[in-house]
Amino acid sequence: MQVNFFFKKRLRALLVFAFLVSVTYGGIMITEYDVIKGFSSIPMAISWGVTNFFPTTDSFEHLPKILISLWETILLSIGSATLASLFALFFAILGSNTTTINPFFATICRFIATLFRNIDVAVWSMILLFSFGQSALTGYFALFFVSFGFLTRAFIETIDEVSNSGVEALRATGASYISIVIHSVIPSSASQMLSWLLFMIETNIRSATLIGILTGTGIGFVFDLYYKSVDYNTASLVVIAIVIAILALEAASNYVRRVII
Amino acid sequence: MDFENIMKRIAPPSNRPVRVKPMNQSAIVIRLTLLSLVILTIIGFFTYDDTDVGMLEGITATFTNFKVMFTEPHFNHFTFMEGLYQVLVTISLALLTTVIGAVISLMLGLLAAKNLSTPKISNSIKNFVAVVRAVPTVLWVLIFAIAAGLGSVAAVIGMTFHSVGYLIKAYSESFEELDDGVIEVLKASGANWWQIVWQAVIPSSMTYIISWTFLRFEINFSVAVAMGAAAGAGGIGYDLFMASSFYLDLRELGTITFYILVFAILLEIVAIRIKRHINIT
């Protein structure tokens, strides 16, 4: 019996392994990915990076311009996530099974969130490019839609996890729906929701760079400009600026998280 | 996406005692953070350069565009089967990066876990990985494209870099959750490092490893779409870029959006299935 158990376990592990290997092989075939070139390009890229990809004194002349667009991009990420969290809170309260007004409504709210979340931010920005053109608003709304979808779902999870018993207790005392939401649901999940919001801002700054390259705005555009004009020294300065901004933001939000949770 | 799993890391339900004082440190920090976010949002609204397009006009135009996209999608530059093949290319890109990334991260994740490694190695890996993660994926791909040329090689290597950064953090944190007593007992019984890893650490964190890896696969799918559009990685993302910036074909953009949406939701359903399956066995 025991021998049989181990045999079955090994067989299953082997099958999973074989499945992964064959699927990977299929992937290599379909994407025409050159494995050898892939691995050999890493040392090549490193040696190229060491000799070419660093800021020189000339590139620091562009620093003010870089910092201005970085600041704009940060504001864009924060603004879109913050406004989206307001909408998401509303939809999450209606969408959570604990606090919904009626189940049909809840399903619709969840469906809307799924729709907005699963259309990728790159897709949104390409769609919005039609109506907003090459302006910061394209990126703003692309980030807003994705943040809204993600945060709605995240807030629903938080409300379900945190406030089930509190809502039940207040309902038993005869409290009205509004006062249950204001005095129990929101206070008890506020710190978790803020933590989600900070996470969303971190994600948005990374996506904002991508959107910038696609739509020609913000820090992504500045990078693309130097990258395409083969000014790799300045491009590297842009990368360093982005890295410092993201690390600082992460440190700040980790500090807030440690204090509030 | 596996929200329960992310929630454990991002926003775990706090197990603090009920607040006694109305204004403690936590409440003050929450308020201050919210206040500063709102102020930054308002400052943002005044700095956005929206001289070319009015906000309201843009929003109404967006709704009309949505209607056209989603109600009248059509095929113009590719057939249904070609579109399906392009999605397959995108999924393959995501799969390759996830598999390569997972193998590398598993090894480095063991070295990065505090309970399995020395503090010096663990800290240096974790700090290095934090910097790798801070560079957006698209920049990694573009940087590698200079050395390897635009195409699937640069895309796979660039995306793998970011995946490795993400997965090492996730893996090492799940390894660290293992009870110290287990390792101590195995050490006392004379097990060597590899035996501890294979018999205790990996089996006990298998559930986490699977769900984090699949989560990364889902993320990599959307990243692969984006890389097709921004860095010439091919797949449905490239069609997306062409339809939007080159052909200016809203209806075809609708078709592509449907493709991406359907596959993203499909992946989410598979993730839920896998999770249910591993929770039972």
Image: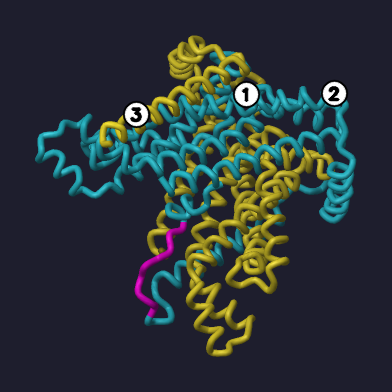
Q: Amino acid at mark 2?
A: His
Do the residues at discs 2 and 1 belong to one chain? no
**Are dots 3 and 2 in contact, CB under 8 Å?**
no
Q: Amino acid at mark 3?
A: Arg
- From where the camera sits, is residue B116 visible? yes
Q: Which residue is mark 1?
A: A227
Q: Which residue is mark 3?
A: A10
Please tell me how many numbered marks the rendered image carries: 3
Q: CA distance from mark 3 to mark 2?
A: 48 Å
Chain painted yellow: A
Q: Residue at position x 68%, y 52% from top? A: A144
Chain painted cyan: B
Using the rendered view, name the quadrant where residue B43 is placed: bottom right
Location of residue B24 with respect to A15 vertically, above or below: below
Instruction: Look at the numbered disc 3 and give the secondary structure of its residue.
Output: helix
* Mark whose residue sits in front, 2 or 1: 2
- Is A70 in front, or is B127? B127
Q: Position of residue B51 (x, y in %)?
A: 82, 48
Residue sitting farthest toward the front: A1
Q: Which residue is mark 2?
A: B77
Q: Is residue B12 magenta?
A: yes
Instruction: Look at the numbered disc 1 and give the secondary structure of its residue.
Output: helix
* Mark whose residue sits in front, 1 or 3: 3
Q: Amino acid at mark 1?
A: Tyr
Segment tinted magenta in the rendering: B11-19
